Amino acid sequence: MEMITGLVGNLFYVFLVLALIAFVLLLEGLYLAWNAYRGPEAKRIEQRLRAMSAAGGKGVETSLLKRRMLSEVPLLERWLLGLPRVHELDRLLQQSGLRWSVAFFIGLSATLSIATFLMLGVVPYLHWMIQLAGATSAAALPGLYVFSKRTQRLHRIEQQLPETLDLISRALKAGHAFPSALQMAAEEVSDPIGGELRIVHDEINYGVAIDTALNNFAVRVPSTDIRYFVVSVLIQRETGGNLTELLGGISTLVRERLKLLGRVRVLSAEGRMSAWILGALPVVVGAIINLINPKFMSVLWTDPLGLKFIYAAVVMMILGALTMRKIIKIRV
């Protein structure tokens, strides 16, 4: 009897050990599965695939990559593929550096629009056109955010370009080939331009012609300075010449342009601030008055003459904003 009891006790301990081992293996399996789909390496590969698909090249592989990244839902994916200019929207998302898909972008815009329309419907004495305008403005917020991130990313790439060109020039002076110089610059320079150069180098390694890879680079990064670099390299490959001196000249040109652009931005800062204040002042004052005395403001959208005043004010504000933007925006 004691032997049977001891055997049962030993089996119980063996079972506990096996259960512990199974639990540890389960955790490890879950971690490996998560790392394979959501880990840093998987995200890096996904970002590279998105970037290569956004380059706008033709072919079966590229089209497959484009279809994969529009949406993970097959039905929604087929619907998105039928939309006009959907790939241009996908390229815009890629240029912004965000990890948004086209389906997420459209869903976010629609959600903000519907939620804003319903919330404004609760406000008393509010005309339905104000609700529609608010919903439209809310739907445009994700697009404005994407454009803002795109502008910041392009500005960051332009800031990094002179240093990158100097690095490529030094690598060429040391005797490296142009693809090797691109690889060295991609490893030394931080993102975002480092990641773009890695994509160019990978495309060349996978058999894409250098001209095509550089053109894809210019499509992914719609910057004038990047186009200067790409066109200069392509012309040098056709006609010959000293690429090292050419890249050094482009680097100096970009540095001087950025220096002049910085001075222009400083001098035009007052005008930009005035434009923002003058544009926001009527909307803010109208909202405050509506909160304090809704009946007083409701005359604007309940009386036909008030609606005419609103239409005229909106048109004049739009014209004024466009005029001030044209005055402030100085192309360098």
Image (cartoon, rainbow, N blue to C red):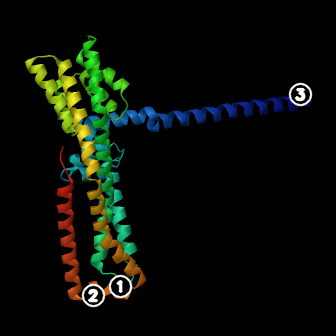
How crowded pointer 2 is (Cα within 10 Å; few <14, some 14-19, many 20+) is rated as few
Q: Residue farthest to the right?
A: 2
Front: mark 3 or 1: 1
Helix, strand, or loop for circle 3? Answer: helix
Please tell me in which quadrant of the rendered image residue 297 appears: bottom left
Q: Along the polypeptide, which appears first: circle 1 or circle 2?
A: 1
Rendering coords of residue 282 (x, y %): 30, 73
Near-viewer residue (322 or 141) = 322
| 3D distance between C-alphas at marks 3 and 2 | 95 Å
Near-viewer residue (266 or 139) = 266
Question: In the image, what residue type sits under mark 2?
Answer: Thr
Q: Which residue has dot 2 on it?
A: 302
Circle on res. 125: 1
Q: With 21 as the anchor, is 52 left or right in this view?
A: left
| 3D distance between C-alphas at marks 3 and 1 | 87 Å
Question: In the image, what residue type sits under mark 1?
Answer: Tyr
Marks 1/2 in contact by CB < 8 Å: the verdict is yes
Residue drawn 31% across the image and 74% down it: 131
Question: In the image, what residue type sits under mark 3?
Answer: Met
How crowded pointer 3 is (Cα within 10 Å; few <14, some 14-19, many 20+) is rated as few
Please tell me in which quadrant of the rendered image residue 195 appears: top left
Front: mark 3 or 2: 2
Helix, strand, or loop for circle 1? Answer: loop
Question: Is residue 64 something that shows in the picture?
Answer: no
Q: Which residue has dot 3 on it?
A: 3
Q: Along the polypeptide, which appears first: circle 3 or circle 1?
A: 3
Q: How many tags in the picture?
A: 3
Residue drawn 26% across the image and 38% down it: 259
Rendering coords of residue 208 (x, y %): 20, 24
- The answer to whether 269 is drawn above or below residue 137 in the figure is above
Rendering coords of residue 253 (x, y %): 20, 31
- The answer to whether 212 is drawn above or below residue 71 in the figure is above
